[in-house]
Image (cartoon, rainbow, N blue to C red):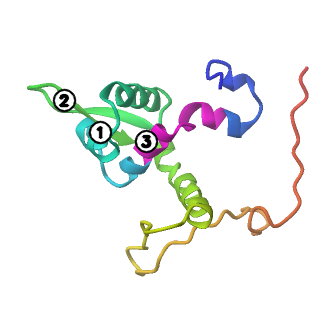
């Protein structure tokens, strides 16, 4: 994917994938939502090479999904915290998870529970205007005119 020209593409899916469209970036965001903030925590959780993790954290930071904050001066150490854009990615993670549960669900799977009610979370995507589950009604795709 050409990340340099992603903003020229009118498709919001394409633009989003240019930022967080690889597995490592999505897994970093998953772990950040689970409370991980430090380089070594991410590396240990995912088994990712340090150079790859450094690149992905830099991209997620540059794109505004994470922000760096220094937590130690001696030695200098930084942690990565979710921004509003990063927190808004949580429903995307849940929808990917629901797809995986349905189509890649063999064996043991992690479950997510609502902390207040104790019920298992079962995410669905709903159109805010109609209230209809996305995928249950016909849709049109409208590409803006290129003038």
| Numbered mark located on residue 83 in the image | 3
Residue under pointer 1: 43
Which residues, given as a range, are shown in magenta?
15-29
Label 2 to label 3: alpha-carbon separation: 19 Å
Answer with mark 1 or mark 3, whichever residue precedes in sequence.
Answer: 1
Q: Residues within 10 Å of mark 2 (few under 14, many from 20)?
A: few
x then y, percent, for residue 95: 59, 58
Return the residue nearer the eye: 48 or 57.
48
Which one is closest to the eye, mark 1 or mark 3?
Answer: 1
Up-down: is 135 above or below 142?
below
| Numbered mark located on residue 77 in the image | 2
x then y, percent, for residue 110: 42, 66
Query: In the rendered structure, does residue 83 fall within the stretch colored magenta?
Result: no
The residue at 57%/37% (across/down) is 21
Answer with mark 2 or mark 3, whichever residue precedes in sequence.
Answer: 2
Label 1 to label 3: alpha-carbon separation: 20 Å
Up-down: is 92 above or below 52?
below
């Amino acid at each position: 994917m050409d990340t340099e020209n992603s903003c020229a593409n009118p498709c919001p899916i394409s633009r989003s994938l240019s930022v967080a469209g690889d597995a490592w970036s999505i897994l970093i965001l998953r772990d950040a939502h689970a409370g991980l903030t430090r380089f070594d925590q991410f590396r240990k959780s995912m088994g990712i090479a340090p150079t790859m993790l450094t690149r992905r954290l830099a991209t997620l930071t540059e794109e505004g999904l994470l922000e760096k904050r220094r937590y130690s001066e001696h030695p200098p150490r930084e942690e990565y915290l979710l921004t509003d854009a990063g927190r808004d990615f949580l429903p995307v993670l849940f929808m990917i998870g629901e797809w995986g549960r349905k189509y890649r669900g063999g064996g043991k799977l992690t479950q997510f529970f609502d902390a207040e009610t104790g019920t298992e979370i079962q995410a669905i995507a709903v159109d805010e205007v109609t209230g209809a589950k996305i995928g249950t009604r016909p849709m049109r795709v409208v590409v803006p005119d290129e003038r």
